């Protein structure tokens, strides 16, 4: 299953578990016992939804402010003497082109695994291991991140190490060779897994001529030829104050957060015109598919066909996003019942929605009888569109979704990622909590409406047996 989309099944008993109880255990634990921060330390208070006065919300005990142009978010939690400190960089795929594809990903790995120029690589790892801290980086389509997990008592030292790996990386030849070999292996095996391959086929037609068409890992040629100076150039594109958001979650106060950023990131350059230079975020235009399409990759040695259909979907912050999230969950359950349980046409079938600035949803199935299977899937979609769900169905799905949602937020890193995602993709971290209110307000009519409007002109990727594929049927919806 492609990690881009999340579609998790949980036992029925969990669906009845109180979402508020789970929230209190996961997010609420971060707020309990946290020190109230002085009002003068922060920017204007964020207005939380009314329900946050009675139940835990992700934005409880959260402050935000700017430090010399770098945006900082702090979620206070005294429950454990640990801190997650993540540095997010806006811009994503807009930093890349065909020649530099994969350079950013390689640079972040070489830098965070090799350490700063001031230290031997082995001494760097020993320093982290001595306090059980970890540093790693990853490159993404919408934004990239360098993450630190550290005990609170060592945060000044470990945050300093992370900052130096970015500002003054060693980019030592052995580490470059190691990281390059791993990245090339990832590229070379991109189509080895049938699940991964079918999504690559689908994205090749759904995301063409969009910034997302460039793969974060790059291609063989661009990665093979990357030099240390290319990696420094990739890092310099990220290291701009106005592109950076630092998110702390854990045992840390505002003054400490300010001091860490001011001290260790003082040498980061400023460029207030970067948005205009990259046409950000306008360049991430929503997907609009004018007609259905299908691309088939022959793989006759496998006994089944892998099918992934991408469709345009609302992005976080859009009015249709909450209804569409719920709609894909309801549709997932109906597809599972009709395709797998009732007709035994597939072992794996689901629908899901991604979380990106320019968003897509997916229909996925494996099928030995693709024509029959797709017909059942289309009919199931039409039934939901035509009102085959009730208010009770919606409420049950909301409880199930929220249980899973809150259970996934038990770690500090997950909470940091959620706050950053809503801040970077929508401009306001509080939208993470507003989304819950919007989800709880979804009606059956909204579910039918969004499925009817968005599940059109689907871009299908197929891996398997071309002679079993009726292209007219696949491009019909």
Image (cartoon, rainbow, N blue to C red):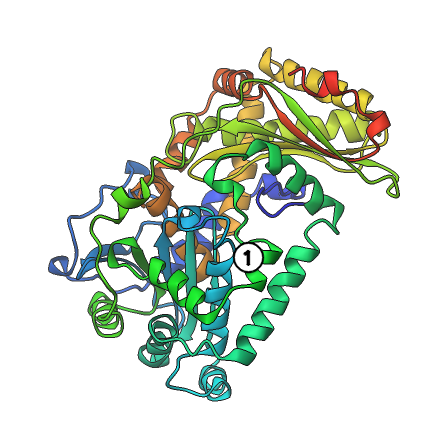
In this rendering, position of residue 294 left or right of residue 77: right
Per the image, the residue denoted by label 1 is 222
Q: Position of residue 404 (x, y in %)?
A: 55, 45
Residue 32 visible in the snapshot? no
Res 335 quadrant in image: top right
Q: Which residue occupies the extreme left position in the image?
A: 40
Task: Answer few, some or many: residues within 10 Å of disc 1's Cα (few below 14, many 20 plus, some between 14 and 19).
Answer: some
Res 456 quadrant in image: top right
Residue 413 visible in the snapshot? yes
Q: Position of residue 221 (x, y in %)?
A: 59, 57
- Which residue is more in the foreground, 68 or 285? 285
The answer to whether 282 is drawn above or below residue 268 in the figure is above
In this rendering, position of residue 336 left or right of residue 97: right
In this rendering, position of residue 67 left or right of residue 230: left
The answer to whether 76 is drawn above or below residue 208 in the figure is below
Task: Give the residue at x 55% y 57%.
Answer: 222
- Which residue is more in the foreground, 91 or 181? 181
- Which residue is more in the foreground, 20 or 406? 406
The answer to whether 138 is drawn above or below residue 431 in the figure is below
Q: Position of residue 116 (x, y in %)?
A: 40, 79
Q: Which residue occupies the extreme top position in the image?
A: 386
Say which element carries label 1. helix
In this rendering, position of residue 13 left or right of residue 148: right
Q: Quadrant of the C terminus?
A: top right
Numbered-mark total? 1
Q: Position of residue 19 (x, y in %)?
A: 49, 43
- Which residue is more in the foreground, 235 or 455? 235
Q: Quadrant of the N terminus?
A: top right
Task: Give the residue at x 30% y 63%.
Answer: 34
């Amino acid at each position: 299953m492609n990690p881009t989309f999340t579609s998790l099944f949980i036992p029925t008993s969990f669906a009845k578990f109180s979402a508020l109880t789970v929230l209190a255990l996961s997010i609420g634990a971060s707020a309990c016992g946290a020190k109230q921060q002085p009002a003068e330390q922060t920017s204007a208070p964020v207005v939380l939804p009314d329900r946050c006065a009675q139940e835990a919300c992700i934005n409880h005990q959260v402050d935000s402010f700017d430090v010399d142009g770098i945006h900082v978010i702090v979620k206070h939690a005294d429950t454990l003497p640990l801190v997650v400190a993540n540095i997010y960089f806006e811009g994503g795929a807009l930093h890349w082109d065909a020649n530099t594809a994969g350079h950013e990903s390689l640079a972040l790995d070489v830098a965070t695994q090799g350490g700063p120029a001031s230290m031997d690589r082995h001494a760097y790892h020993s320093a982290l291991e001595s306090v059980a801290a970890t540093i790693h980086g990853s490159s993404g389509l919408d934004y990239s991140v360098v993450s630190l997990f550290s005990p609170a008592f060592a945060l000044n030292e470990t945050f300093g190490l992370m900052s130096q790996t970015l500002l003054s990386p060693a980019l030592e030849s052995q580490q470059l060779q190691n990281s390059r070999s791993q990245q090339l292996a990832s590229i070379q095996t991109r189509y080895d897994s049938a699940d991964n391959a079918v999504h690559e086929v689908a994205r090749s037609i759904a995301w063409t001529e969009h910034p997302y068409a460039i793969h974060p890992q790059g291609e063989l040629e661009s990665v093979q030829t990357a030099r240390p100076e290319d990696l420094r150039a990739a890092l310099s594109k990220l290291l701009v104050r106005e592109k950076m958001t630092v998110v702390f979650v854990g045992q840390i106060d505002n003054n400490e957060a300010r001091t860490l950023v001011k001290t260790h990131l003082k040498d980061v350059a400023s460029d207030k015109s970067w948005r205009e230079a990259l046409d950000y975020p306008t360049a991430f235009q929503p997907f609009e598919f004018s007609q259905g399409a299908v691309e088939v990759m022959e793989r006759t040695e496998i006994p089944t066909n892998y099918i992934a259909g991408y469709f345009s979907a609302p992005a976080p912050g859009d009015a249709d996003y909450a209804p569409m999230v719920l709609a894909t969950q309801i549709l997932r359950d109906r597809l599972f019942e009709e395709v797998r349980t009732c007709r035994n046409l597939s072992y794996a079938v689901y629908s899901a929605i991604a979380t990106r600035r320019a968003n897509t949803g997916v229909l996925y199935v494996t099928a030995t009888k693709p024509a029959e299977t797709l017909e059942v899937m289309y009919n199931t979609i039409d039934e939901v569109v035509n009102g085959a769900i009730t208010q009770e169905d919606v409420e049950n799905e909301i409880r199930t979704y929220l249980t899973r949602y809150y259970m996934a937020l038990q770690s500090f890193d997950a909470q940091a990622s959620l706050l950053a995602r809503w801040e970077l993709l929508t401009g306001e971290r509080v939208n993470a909590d507003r989304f819950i209110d919007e989800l709880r307000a979804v009606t059956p009519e909204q579910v039918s409406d969004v499925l009817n409007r968005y599940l059109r002109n689907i871009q299908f990727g197929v891996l398997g047996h071309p002679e079993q594929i009726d292209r007219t049927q696949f491009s019909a919806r």
